[in-house]
Image (cartoon, grey):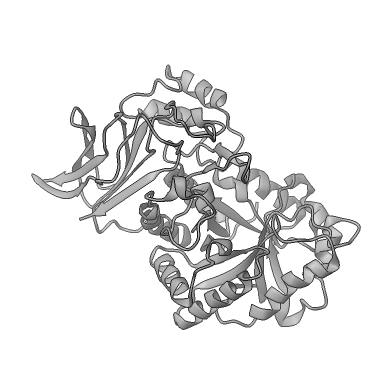
Amino acid sequence: MKKRDNPKFVFAHHMVGNTYPYTVDNWASDIALAQSSGIDGFALNVGSDVWQPARVQDAYTAAANSSTDFKLFLSFDMSALPCSSPDDAQTLRNYITSYSSHPNQFIVDGRVFASTFSGESCTFGQDSVPDGWKSQFTQHPDLTGANAVYFVPSFFIDPSTFNQYQGVMDGDFNWNSGWNVGLTPDQLNSALNSVGSGLGSLTGAITSSITQAVSGLVGTMDSDNQHLQALSSVSSSLSYMAAASPWFFTHYGANSYNKNWIYLADFFLYPTRWENLISNRNSVDFVECISWNDYGESHYLGPIEGAQPNSQAWVDGFDHTGWLDMTNYYATAFKTGSYPNITQDKLYMWARPHPTNANSPDPVPKPTNFQLDQDTLWAVVFATAPATVTLATADSTSQDFFVPAGVTKLSLQLTPGGYMQGTISRNGNTVVDLKPDNYTFNPNPPTYNYNAFVAFASS
């Protein structure tokens, strides 16, 4: 398998479709926050709205104004952009030629980096999908010289067919590698049964035996290895971009987008995924965090701003910037090959707002695979030195943990009607005390919400 010694990059997927009210200043704020969080650039997901090109221009303007080397590239959302005629490809080529010489455009091997979400059924009026992409995009006369494209799409295809895309793909973005997308409650239950546990019976802290039992299901490299093997069978020069995502819950009814499911994100999906990517960094060129601001699927790392896609019912009040803060540590390790020293005590906590099996008058039913979720408070501690961490979810439910210097993952059973609280203490002094006052584990929710409430604090 190709050993990838090139400089590593970490990007975040930014939904331009959720930025209708943005100004250049909003983009400048996002860029500064992303850069301070270890993110090197944005993949700009562009769709078909007539106003989106202006927002893309604002993003590039803000990047230039930042006087930094923050990178931008286009990620064409082919689930929204038309792609049945040659004229449809002109839109994509225009984006490339408009920014090919921009100082913040991400360039690889002297070519303009570009990606997609989907596109595996686009023919652009040609006889086949590969011919469409090849003749109308990657090898079109408009895209030569300084406008030549380095194309790393996310095509949802069997990796064994990658060889059909020679002349199209310079690499592969494995979108679904961020989650175990095929995992069912029965499969998770079977893994837990192997250590005498099961779905719905997890109480107290998650034991090491349970963590071991689910380790083959959470944040693994299984999908990556399948894609990497397929890439290497085509050419040793093809690049690979993996995904890292903290969560997934979407809750649109049949009269809306008709998307209502979860993927397993419990058992510390985000830090675990990063740890595996860091351990396998020799095989991975780029990591794309999914996402910066895709509120509809609940995996946003950035602040809640812009224009939501009718997701307010499960997003408003559910800040995720704790996960963004955590990203810096892991992104730095991925890029350098060494975990940075922990110079500040930090505590991250997250949990859902109601029990997995709670019932609600919500007209949209519980999401598919809701049974995967545990009624658990998840916590990650960054400790500068050995310390005592106390987690509590009610006055009557708390536990002390003695943690070494470094990173420790902890958990505690949630309490219906209760809260989340965590402290880090050392030598009799409390150095971090975190108890968000706007979180309650509500046993009687008005609507179904399997999003995460994320809180964090530092010394």
User: Going by the image, does 128 lie left or right of 417?
Assistant: right
The residue lying toward the viewer, choosing from 236 and 175, is 175
The outermost residue toward the right is: 127
The residue lying toward the viewer, choosing from 75 and 386, is 75
User: Going by the image, does 45 lie left or right of 195?
Assistant: right
Q: Is residue 376 above or below residue 52?
A: above
Q: Which x, y percent locates residue 374?
A: 41, 30
The outermost residue toward the left is: 428
The outermost residue toward the top is: 196
The answer, for residue 109, to whether it is visible in the render is no
The residue lying toward the viewer, choosing from 231 and 214, is 214
Name the quarter where the C terminus is drawn: bottom left
Residue 56, quarter of the rendered image:
bottom right
User: Going by the image, does 321 lie left or right of 291?
Assistant: left
Q: Is residue 55 above or below residue 191?
A: below
Q: Which x, y percent locates residue 168?
A: 78, 62
Residue lying at 20% horizontally and 49% vertically, measured from the top left: 385
Residue 13, quarter of the rendered image:
bottom right
Q: Is residue 385 above or below residue 147?
A: above
Q: Which x, y percent locates residue 347?
A: 27, 48
Residue lying at 73% horizontally and 46% vertically, measured from the top left: 159
Q: Which x, y percent locates residue 355?
A: 39, 30
The answer, for residue 159, to whether it is visible in the render is yes
The residue lying toward the viewer, choosing from 324 and 282, is 324
Residue lying at 67% horizontally and 80% vertically, measured from the top left: 98
